[in-house]
Image (cartoon, helix red, strand yellow):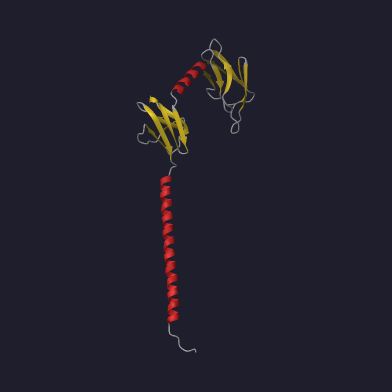
């Protein structure tokens, strides 16, 4: 029980956030109180704000609750709004010129001679393949669980397509099964026609057979 106290040093004016998923209690800083309602296996706290770092760059934060709880080793973080705005502006400047998507793929026209790694907001699951500037298809890498494609020394186009794993073998097996069924159906049909033909021949021969006795 009691309070766990943390002291952080950040750039003056930075926004301070706390994150302790399963913490249940109050988090206090100068002039700010933030409640936590975490309960393990049921409810996790989101990232919550605690205001801004004062002019001296130091901030003391306390986690208080009468019951003993586990708190992450690094529950606090600082965010500089100016740096975030600059990073967002840089990403927007490098964004695709044109982006199109279909049911099983997407294409991106990039600014000329783009370098680095293109990260797509698509889960990096098995079955994706990507091409840079019409080159050979390759399985993409992953970044934070998302599709990531290295652009090499410079690229202007990126194409990615998805094919469910096992699709081609499955289609081949289905096609083979369909052909087998068709062959069985044709064989049965031929045998049926032959059987009916032989039956008619027997009837014809019976009609032609000499009969003895009677009138």
Q: Vertical placement of 152 versus 207: above or below? A: above
| Count of residue discs | 0
Depth check: give the residue in front, 19 or 169: 169
In the picture, which quadrant includes the N terminus?
top right
Residue at the image position 42 percent from the left and 57 percent from the top: 180
Q: Quadrant of residue 160?
A: top left
Q: Quadrant of residue 204?
A: bottom left
**Residue 131 can be seen, yes or no:** yes
Position of residue 145 measured from the top left corner of the image (x, y, whole percent): 47, 32
Q: Among all residues in the image, which is located at the extreme top?
A: 56
Asked if residue 77 lies left or right of residue 149, the reply is right
Q: Vertical placement of 8 versus 183: above or below? A: above
Position of residue 51 measured from the top left corner of the image (x, y, whole percent): 58, 17
Residue at the image position 62 percent from the left and 17 percent from the top: 32
Q: Among all residues in the image, which is located at the extreme right?
A: 66
**Residue 114 can be seen, yes or no:** no
Residue at the image position 50 percent from the left and 16 percent from the top: 82
Depth check: give the residue in front, 166 or 96: 96
Depth check: give the residue in front, 150 or 42: 150
Asked if residue 125 lies left or right of residue 21, the reply is left
Q: Vertical placement of 31 versus 99: above or below? A: above
Position of residue 110 measured from the top left corner of the image (x, y, whole percent): 41, 27
Depth check: give the residue in front, 14 or 212: 212
């Amino acid at each position: 029980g009691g309070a766990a106290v943390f002291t952080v040093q950040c750039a003056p004016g930075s926004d301070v956030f706390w994150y302790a998923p399963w913490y249940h209690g109050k988090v206090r800083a100068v002039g700010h109180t933030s409640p936590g309602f975490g309960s393990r296996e049921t409810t996790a706290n989101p990232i919550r704000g605690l205001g801004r770092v004062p002019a001296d760059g130091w901030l003391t934060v306390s986690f208080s609750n009468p019951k003993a709880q586990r708190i992450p080793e690094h529950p606090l973080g600082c965010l500089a709004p100016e740096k975030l705005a600059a990073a967002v502006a840089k990403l927007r400047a490098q964004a695709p010129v044109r982006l199109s998507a279909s049911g099983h793929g997407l294409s991106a026209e990039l600014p000329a001679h783009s370098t680095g790694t293109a990260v797509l907001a698509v889960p990096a699951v098995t079955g994706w393949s990507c091409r840079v500037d019409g080159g050979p298809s390759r399985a993409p890498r992953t970044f934070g669980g998302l599709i990531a494609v290295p652009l090499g020394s410079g690229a202007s186009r990126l194409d990615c397509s998805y094919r469910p794993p096992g699709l081609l073998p499955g289609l081949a097996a289905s096609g083979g099964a369909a052909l087998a069924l068709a062959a069985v159906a044709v064989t049965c049909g031929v045998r049926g026609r032959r059987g009916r033909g032989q039956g008619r021949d027997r009837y014809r021969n019976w009609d032609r057979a000499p009969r003895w006795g009677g009138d």
